Image (tube, helix red, strand yellow):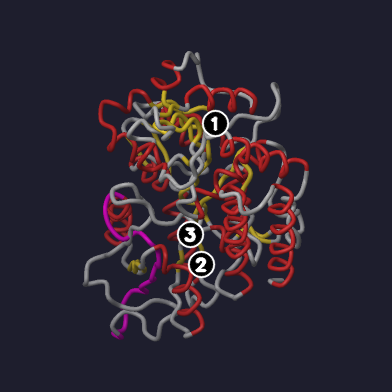
Amino acid sequence: MTPARRTAGLSRRHFALALPSALLASGCAAPHQGIGRPGDPIVLTLLSHYASGELKEALQGPVNEWNATHDLVKVRTKAVEFTDLLTTLMVRQAAGQGADIVHPYCLWNGQLVRAGVLRPAPPEHAEEITRGYGKAAVGSASVGGKVYGYPTEVQTYALYYNKRLLREAGVDGPPRTWRELEETAYRTTRRDQYGNTLVQGFGLSTYDDSTTVGQTLALLNAAGGTFVSTDGRTTAIDSPAGRAVFDLEHHLVAKGASAPGVNVYQAFPSGQVAMVVSAGWWTTSLKTLMGKAYRDVGVAPVPVPEAHGKRATLSTGFMLGVNAACRHPREAWEFLRWLNTDRVGVKGATATRMSALQVSVGSLTGRADDMRTLLGRGGDPNLRPFLDALAYAVPEPNVPGAQQAKSLLRKNIEALWTGQQSVDEALRTTRRQVDQEVSHSW
């Protein structure tokens, strides 16, 4: 999660970065350094999707700090909307105009490595990343066993639930198993006298890739399954775990506890959905949207099929890496090390600049120690299940054909939910289409 568009006021993903116009000199992958005078600093360009709002402001601080304290190397940021980011990365690279530092969605890393966009991290940086970040974050930032960048925002998936709706249905707390999940979904579903759904027990939504696929993969991981095989050349969805997930979702829709056509990002805050699986970025948006009603929101781990089952969930994220065409990679990696590993004081604690940045906007990095320190000082307790999940989350597959494979999976999930395909047909079609895509992409 691609992390696609949200409704107005919900998104933190479509932000861009802008630095003062004085830093208009081009960087390593562009034709000039500085403005051509002897002694001009190297100016590195950083391409991201942070376009406005709180993330723009949050990143502006450390970038300005770097530029104010480093005379020989400056950083200039460029921005595009998230929906244009992958295309921009590929097109600019082909035209020889790629940015020196790039901030891709980790789902794309396999494709970007194959296209020659990403440079492997030097050994000392790879060692720092492997040592300092959780397994899922390192996996997202790696392709073929090689680390390609510093993880930035990391999202894990958990179960959001409305305490009031569960309480009114006589349910004591959030479900821990799939049986409890179904029972709670049916008990909290409410309809009017004409049969119209007033409250969905469990929110399945066809809103976008991130929602439809993210929910399903989180449940698949919780069942011990994976979407793509270990070697990245076939899908593993047509498995007992995959069948169990598709069966669960089919039952919820068929029995009226889920209405996939409803936008859960609007329905949950308004009290029309009792439970939904989503990523941690949503907490800040819910707090803003719901006001006092946010006290009814709880977060719990994604339920597992059986009691005492091993926990697992989905992890997605972004990373900062260096372009393979960058003419000053040493300087680019040094900036990334400074941003992502140097520790600074934050309200009486210490953490990396990137960790402090993400927590300030209600998100996480893959540095669990930083997160525990920062969240222990007045942070939202609803973020803690997402922090705990860093220890057991499964990274989203990032093989070369991952983006298209994800889109194909979404198409078949939606066909299942809308009754166009049976469970058998959806599994069979997904396996055939995704196998063809990922094998073709190598």
Q: Nearer the viewer, residue 238 or 98?
A: 238
- Residue at horizontal 52%, vertical 33%? 257
Q: Nearer the viewer, mark 2 or mark 1?
A: 1
- Residue at horizontal 64%, vertical 72%? 114
Seen in the picture, residue 334 relative to 263 is either above or below; the reply is below
If the image is split into quadrants, where does the C terminus sit? bottom right
- Residue at horizontal 76%, vertical 54%? 230
Q: Nearer the viewer, residue 394 or 17?
A: 394
Query: Could you classify mark 3 by the number of other residues whose Cα lies within 10 Å: few (under 14), some (14-19), or many (20 or more)?
Result: many
Residue 239 is covered by the magenta coloring:
no
Q: Earlier in the sequence, mark 1 or mark 3?
A: 3
Q: Amino acid at mark 3?
A: Leu
Secondary structure beneath dot 2 equals: strand
Seen in the picture, residue 128 relative to 115 is either above or below; the reply is above
- Look at mark 1 in the image and give the residue it sits on: 388
Q: What distance separates the C-alpha of mark 1 from that of mark 3?
A: 23 Å
- Residue at horizontal 33%, vertical 53%? 59
Cβ–Cβ under 8 Å for marks 2 and 1: no
Where on the picture, by quarter, is residue 196? top left
The spot of residue 231 in percent (x, y) is 77, 58
Where on the picture, by quarter, is residue 13? bottom left
Secondary structure beneath dot 1 equals: helix
Residue 42 is covered by the magenta coloring:
yes
The spot of residue 294 in percent (x, y) is 32, 28
Q: Which residues are magenta?
A: 36-54
Query: Could you classify mark 1 by the number of other residues whose Cα lies within 10 Å: few (under 14), some (14-19), or many (20 or more)?
Result: some
Q: Residue furthest front?
A: 194
- Look at mark 3 in the image and give the residue it sits on: 320
Q: Nearer the viewer, residue 382 or 131?
A: 382
Q: Amino acid at mark 2?
A: Val
